[in-house]
Amino acid sequence: MDLHILDIILRIIQIVLLPLVAFVVKILLDQRKQLNSLDRRITTAESCLEQVPSEKVLHELSLTIRDFGGDLQVAVEKIEGLRNIVDRVERVVARHEEYLLHGGNR
């Protein structure tokens, strides 16, 4: 092989092949960076999903809240009953106070 042909081959490699290889290496490095970024995001998402309650836990929570609602309704009804009793006691006390203040003369 003569030196002129070798020189042409080396120039072709230098002009065509080396930039092409550099371009492919750059693409591969960019892909690797994206893959690492996606891997971090998936790891973060998985750790968040591990803390999400299961369907069974959410169902139990829903039942517990419904039970609290029933208990709250019972408490409201009892408070209403107590309010009626307090209203009657206030009327009686008001009558006694009125009697005592005016000595039964009205």
Image (tube, helix red, strand yellow):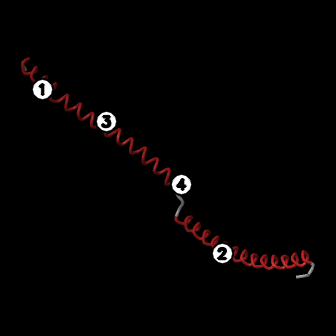
Which amino acid does the dot numbered 4 rest on?
Gln
| Residue in view at x 11 percent, y 24 percent | 9
Q: Nearer the viewer, mark 2 or mark 1?
A: 2
- Of badges 3 and 4, the one in the foreground is 4
Instruction: Tell us which disc is closer to us: 4 or 2.
Output: 2
Residue hosting label 4: 51
Residue closer to the observer: 59 or 86: 86
Q: Name the residue under label 3.
A: 29
- How far is mark 3 from mark 2, CA to CA? 64 Å
The reply to whether callout 4 and callout 2 are in contact (CB within 8 Å) is no
Q: Which of marks 1 and 4 is in front?
A: 4
User: Which residue occupies the extreme top position in the image?
Assistant: 3
- Residue 66 quadrant: bottom right
Q: Where is the C terminus found, in terms of image quarters?
A: bottom right
* Mark 1 and mark 3: Cα distance apart in space: 25 Å
Residue type for callout 2:
Gln
Real-space CA distance between mark 3 and mark 4, rounded to the nearest whole angstrom = 34 Å
| Nearest the eye: 74 or 58 | 74
Disc 3 marks which amino acid? Leu
* Sequence-first tag of 3 and 4: 3
The numbered dot on residue 12 is 1
Mark 3 Cα-neighbour bin, 10 Å: few <14, some 14–19, many ≥20: few
* Position of residue 64 measured from the top left corner of the image (x, y, whole percent): 62, 69
The residue under the point 42% across, 46% down is 41
Q: Nearer the N terminus, badge 1 or badge 3?
A: 1
Residue position for label 2: 73
